[in-house]
Image (cartoon, helix red, strand yellow):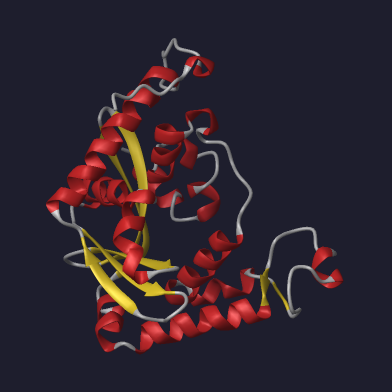
């Protein structure tokens, strides 16, 4: 494990760049399990991704908010927006996200969990899992937990979303890296209702099972010395 790499991974340009691609991450689990032909291929940033990035930055690194661009127009169908050469947030979307941030910060329990003295923010780490090096970056590292901030379109469906979006494998990978359980602090983007979700042993085991299956695909097609061509990949399952 390289202490120098961990230090460099604090910078997003390295974490998501060439250095970061030396390591597997939770985002790779979904690709390896469901579409390995797209493994480590960069996709276009979506509106949801920008919204999530803005929310995290506003909560944890507000000094970096100047990196975001906005346009004050009614929709993305306007001539002004279509004249842009990239995806940006609308001003009204920014204002709604700011309301989410204010709502989460105004809850004393959430505020204490996130901003307690001694907490660390955006902390990268590395760990060997199944003979392969993995990376992760903790939103908030406390004395007891890895606290991860999430937005959701439906708080009542968040439990199901955890499995759909591989938050279970995230909880397992991050526990391996940081040695602590993961806690999700969640806010509903529609209702502004909030929830706290802790990781059970069964949840982490589900994540471990996913990582094991993902590593099998990785070792077959992508690991150094692997002989199989990814074009030969197919899914096999007993129903």
Residue 10 drawn at (x, y percent): 44, 55
Residue 53 drawn at (x, y percent): 52, 64
Question: Which residue is painted at 18% across and 44% down in the image?
Answer: 205
Question: Which residue is painted at 42% across and 32% down in the image?
Answer: 32
Q: Nearer the viewer, residue 29 or 56?
A: 29
Q: Is residue 189 left or right of residue 109?
A: right
| Whether residue 185 is situated above or below residue 110 in the rendered picture | above
- Give the position of the C terminus as an image quadrant: top left
Say how many tags the image has.
Answer: 0
| Whether residue 37 is situated above or below residue 110 in the rendered picture | above
Residue 62 drawn at (x, y percent): 50, 76
| Whether residue 217 is situated above or below residue 167 in the rendered picture | above
Q: In which quadrant of the rendered view does residue 212 lie?
A: top left
Question: Which residue is painted at 45% across and 49% down in the image?
Answer: 8
Residue 48 drawn at (x, y percent): 55, 62
Extreme residue in the front direction: 239
| Whether residue 223 is situated above or below residue 103 in the rendered picture | above
Question: Which residue is painted at 25% across and 44% down in the image?
Answer: 207
- Give the position of the N terminus as an image quadrant: top left
Q: Nearer the viewer, residue 67 or 200?
A: 200
């Amino acid at each position: 494990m390289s202490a120098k790499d961990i230090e460099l991974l604090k910078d997003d340009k390295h974490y998501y760049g060439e250095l970061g691609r030396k390591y597997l991450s939770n985002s790779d689990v979904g690709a390896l399990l469901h579409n390995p032909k797209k493994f480590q291929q960069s996709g276009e940033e979506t509106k949801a991704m920008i919204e999530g990035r803005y929310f995290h930055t506003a909560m944890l690194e507000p000094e970096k908010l100047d990196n975001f661009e906005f346009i004050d127009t009614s929709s993305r169908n306007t001539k002004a927006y279509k004249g842009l050469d990239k995806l940006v947030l609308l001003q009204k979307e920014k204002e709604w996200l700011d309301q989410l941030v204010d709502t989460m910060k105004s809850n004393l329990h959430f505020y204490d969990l996130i901003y307690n003295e001694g907490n660390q923010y955006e902390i990268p780490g590395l760990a060997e899992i199944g003979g392969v090096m993995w990376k992760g970056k903790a939103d908030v590292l406390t004395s007891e937990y890895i606290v991860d901030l999430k937005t959701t379109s439906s708080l009542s469906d968040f439990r199901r979303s955890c499995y759909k979006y591989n938050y279970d494998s995230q909880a397992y990978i991050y526990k391996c890296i940081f040695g602590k359980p993961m806690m999700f602090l969640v806010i509903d983007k529609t209702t502004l209702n909030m929830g706290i979700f802790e990781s059970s042993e069964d949840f982490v085991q589900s994540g471990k099972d996913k990582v094991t299956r993902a590593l099998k695909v990785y070792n077959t097609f992508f690991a150094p010395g692997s002989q199989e061509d990814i074009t030969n990949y197919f899914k096999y399952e007993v129903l």
